[in-house]
Image: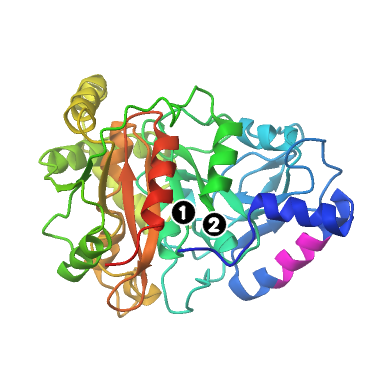
């Protein structure tokens, strides 16, 4: 699946060919962003460009989830527009991009408190999926996915707690990378669950995601050249996933002779542990917000469960986390380069089917958006959502590729190979 929108390299090359200045290029991009946003409602704020620094990204304008501190602005966090606060500095990740010459031109709408698998947000107009007006936009990095899929920005930074980068990426047919825990700094980023939160990247092109990843990584990544290739791929297609989706994914991978069907028997336990951590930590952060009118039902539900969890039980889960993660990594990545699994358990729903309170609301379809996501956050390993085509209903179809810690470059390399395979 290729994008109709240009890559970062193509954008910067075109600027040189045309011979316009960086600030002129940014103003032109801002005009396009403004026009497009009027149709798609994916931004919480437009930001006038400043003169960029000289670097590899000079002349590039970007849009990011409204969860990052931006110079002079605290994030809106899905509750409203960013707030002007003197003395606020860029989040570390945004500062790194600015040091490379990029400029933030807008902030993207998101689920309130980053707690929600869809774009449902009473504080903003409905966020529109560029693929089809009826399709849901996943959350919580909803506006980021729309901004990328519509060509407003080539990449966008988001956060992923239990799928909040991968869900919207898959719903809009783009790439979404959840990074290894701590690989990209969370300094200056609002939190939902400190243990599970991870900064991720949404993009149209794998080369762009790799470029931004290399700029932002706080640790050395495993080089693809030095990666010990086993030429084996594990594929988990759980029975609770729609049979037609399982069939479509398997058919797409038929040309990979090294694919082996596996079972992740630890899934139920890992999902339980993830839910416990999310509920406890969210409640610790936002228990005093639950009576506010702006507090969404999703956060109230999560925090309600958190109130029932004893601190001792939570600490036991946290203390066992490293051991559990190490055992999983040893079991699945000693013999496999990557492990694949679906992104969703059902075909992409319409927005009204997953909007809480709507007459057509279907709880199982809402759960289907995030059910296969959060356990990966608990493990702290990377996951790349890869668009591979369309499902039996003609809706975007993606798979997740997961790997050992710091193996993001290998996941990207694998994604390149899978997209070059002939169908069927």
Instruction: Tell me, yes or no, if residue 311 can be seen here.
Output: no
How far across and down, in percent of the image, does residue 341 sit?
A: 25, 51
Q: Which residue is drawn at 30% across and 52% down?
A: 301
- Residue 395 point in image, percent of width and height: 36, 74
Name the residue: 23% across, 28% down. 329
Disc 2 crowd rating (10 Å Cα; few below 14, some 14-19, many 20+) is many
Q: In which quarter of the image is the N terminus?
A: bottom left
Q: In which quarter of the image is residue 351?
A: bottom left
Q: Does the magenta stretch include residue 223?
A: no
- Tell me which corner region of the image, top left, top right, bottom left or bottom right, holds residue 192: top left
Crowding at label 1, few (<14), some or many (≥20) Cα neighbours within 10 Å?
Answer: many
| SS label for mark 2 | loop
Q: Position of residue 18 (x, y in %)?
A: 86, 59
Q: Are marks 2 and 1 in contact (CB under 8 Å)?
A: yes
Is 34 magenta? The answer is yes
Q: Is the magenta stretch mostly helix, strand or loop?
A: helix
Label 1: state its secondary structure: strand
x and y percent of residue 103 in the render? 74, 45
| Residue 291 falls left or right of residue 93 | left
Q: Give the range drawn in magenta.
A: 28-35
Cα separation between marks 2 and 1: 6 Å
According to the image, what is the colour scheme of the structure?
A: rainbow
Residue 213 shows up from this direction: yes
For the point 56% across and 70% down, the residue is 125
Q: Does residue 411 sit above or below 218 in this rendering?
A: below
Residue 175's disc is: 1
Residue 398 occupies which quadrant of the picture?
A: bottom left
**Image check: 111 left or right of 162?**
right
**What residue is disc 2 on?**
204
Q: Is residue 45 left or right of residue 424?
A: right
């Amino acid at each position: 699946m290729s994008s109709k929108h240009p890559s970062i390299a193509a954008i910067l090359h075109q600027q040189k060919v045309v011979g316009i200045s960086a600030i002129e290029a940014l103003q032109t991009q801002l005009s396009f962003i403004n026009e497009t946003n009027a149709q798609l409602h994916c931004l919480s704020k437009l930001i006038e460009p400043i003169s960029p620094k000289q670097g590899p990204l000079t002349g590039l304008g970007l849009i990011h989830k409204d969860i990052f501190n931006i110079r002079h602005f605290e994030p809106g966090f899905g509750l409203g527009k960013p707030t002007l606060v003197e003395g606020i500095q860029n989040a570390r990740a945004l500062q790194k991009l600015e040091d490379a010459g990029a400029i933030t031109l807008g902030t993207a709408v998101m689920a309130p408190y980053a707690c929600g698998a869809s774009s449902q947000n009473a504080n903003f107009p409905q966020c529109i999926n560029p693929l089809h007006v009826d399709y849901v936009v996943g959350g919580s990095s909803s506006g980021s996915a729309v901004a990328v899929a519509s060509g407003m920005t080539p990449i966008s930074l988001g956060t992923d707690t239990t799928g909040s980068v991968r869900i919207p990426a898959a719903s809009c047919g783009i790439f979404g990378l959840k990074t290894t825990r701590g690989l990209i700094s969370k300094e200056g980023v609002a939190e939902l669950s400190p243990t599970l939160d991870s900064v991720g990247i949404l993009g149209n092109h794998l080369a762009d995601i790799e470029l931004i990843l290399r700029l932002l990584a706080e640790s050395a990544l495993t080089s693809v050249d030095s990666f010990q290739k086993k030429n084996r791929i594990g594929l988990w297609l759980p029975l609770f996933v729609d049979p037609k989706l399982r069939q479509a994914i398997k058919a797409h991978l038929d040309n990979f002779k090294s694919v082996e069907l596996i079972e992740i028997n630890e899934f139920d336990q890992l999902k339980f542990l993830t839910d416990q951590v999310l509920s406890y930590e969210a409640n610790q952060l936002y228990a005093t917000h639950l009576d506010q009118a702006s507090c969404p039902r999703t956060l109230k539900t999560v925090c309600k469960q958190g109130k029932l969890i004893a601190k001792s039980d939570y600490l036991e889960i946290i203390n066992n986390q490293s051991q559990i993660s190490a055992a999983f990594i040893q079991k699945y990545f000693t013999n496999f380069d990557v492990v694949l699994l679906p992104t969703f358990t059902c075909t992409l729903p319409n927005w009204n089917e997953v909007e809480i309170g709507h007459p057509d609301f279907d709880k199982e379809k809402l759960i289907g958006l995030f059910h296969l996501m959060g356990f990966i956050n608990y493990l702290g390993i990377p996951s790349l959502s890869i668009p591979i085509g369309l499902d039996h209903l003609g809706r975007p179809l993606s798979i997740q590729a997961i790997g050992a810690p710091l193996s993001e470059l290998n996941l990207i390399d694998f994604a390149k190979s899978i997209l070059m395979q002939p169908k069927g």
